[in-house]
Amino acid sequence: MKHAFKKLAAVTIGSLMATAVAAADYPAKPIQVIIPFGAGGNSDTSGRILLNGMQKVLGADLVPVNVPGAGGTIGMAQFAGAEADGYTLAFSPSAPTTLQPNLRPLPYGKDSMVAVCLLTDNPTAVTVSPDSPYSSMEELVEAAKAETLIVAGPAPGSVPHITQAALANAIGTTFTYLPVGGGAEEAKALLGKQADLAADNSAMGTVHGLKTLAVASAERIDELPDVPTLTELGIDVQVSIFNGLYAPANTPVEILETLSDACGQAVEDPEVKSRLQDANFIVRYLGHEDFQAFYEEQFDASLEMLTKIGLVK
């Protein structure tokens, strides 16, 4: 029995030493970063900007790999099943990490990943076409209670889809949801009169020449200082689309800290910051520990919101 314990202890100590050595040498080879959406989208754009900045700090290649499908869950499932050695990461927006795992059974959940760093955090906003009959949120709410308005957005289960459902619940009505795709497709639907409003990223108005009636944030944002928040209008809806870097659960803390520090240095790079801002992202860096706390808070808040609006029982 003593020999067995000694053997087990030797194996355990050996494994810990091997992990420590691996972490000390990290990164010793290219790092694969799964982006669970196609090339050219918001997560792909912001992710590639970050990875380019982190490469300069780490001295190793960070290789973006687009794995689109099923609202981002195919890529995240692939990532979550990877070895926790720091050589497979994921850069994802919030829907695949906080909404989708709460909406349906998936091969991953909150405990399948650990947060590395937060990069951007844009609130959602209610936008309409420039010639919309609604010049204020109050007018839109009044109309929504009198008739069923049509909301354009990405696939069901996306942050914009959840935002419009939360908005409808808060004002005591329902919308007809029209899945057309994100960004440009939503703008096209608004400008072409196929839809009355959208509830997507707060940058939509600026990017596509739309009229923004309200933002779903706790406070007004610098980018739209004259636009009220839903909260100050008495509508209790706060939803944002945040993008961050994740590692599989059980990744050694030394590796997480190395990645988190590299992310922080990249965000301070004037070129990285400028490229993100030019692409209409609101930069909000949080390191490993702070982002982990924020992620867990958002995951639980998403479940509460989904339950409140009747999408989860």
Image (spheres, rainbow, N blue to C red):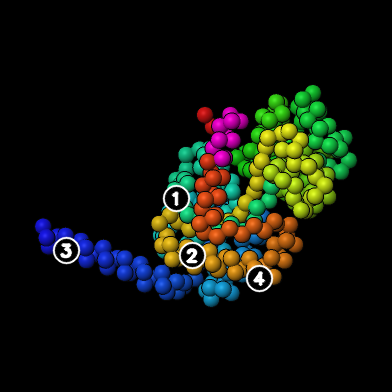
**Pointer 3 local density, CA inside 10 Å: few below 14, some 14–19, many at least 20:** few
Separation (CA) of disc 1 from disc 2: 18 Å
Mark 1: secondary structure: helix
The circle drawn on residue 6 is 3
Q: Nearer the viewer, residue 121 or 154?
A: 121
Q: Quadrant of the N terminus?
A: bottom left
- Rendered position, 211 above or below 117: above
Residue on which the image places disc 2:
257
Q: Residue at x 61, y 54 (%)?
A: 243
Q: Position of residue 115 (x, y in %)?
A: 51, 55
Magenta extent: 301-310
Residue 133 in sight from this viewpoint? yes
Residue 227 found in image quarter: top right
Given the image, on which type of amino acid does mark 2 rest?
A: Glu
In this rendering, the label closer to the viewer, 4 or 1: 4
Residue on which the image places disc 1:
112
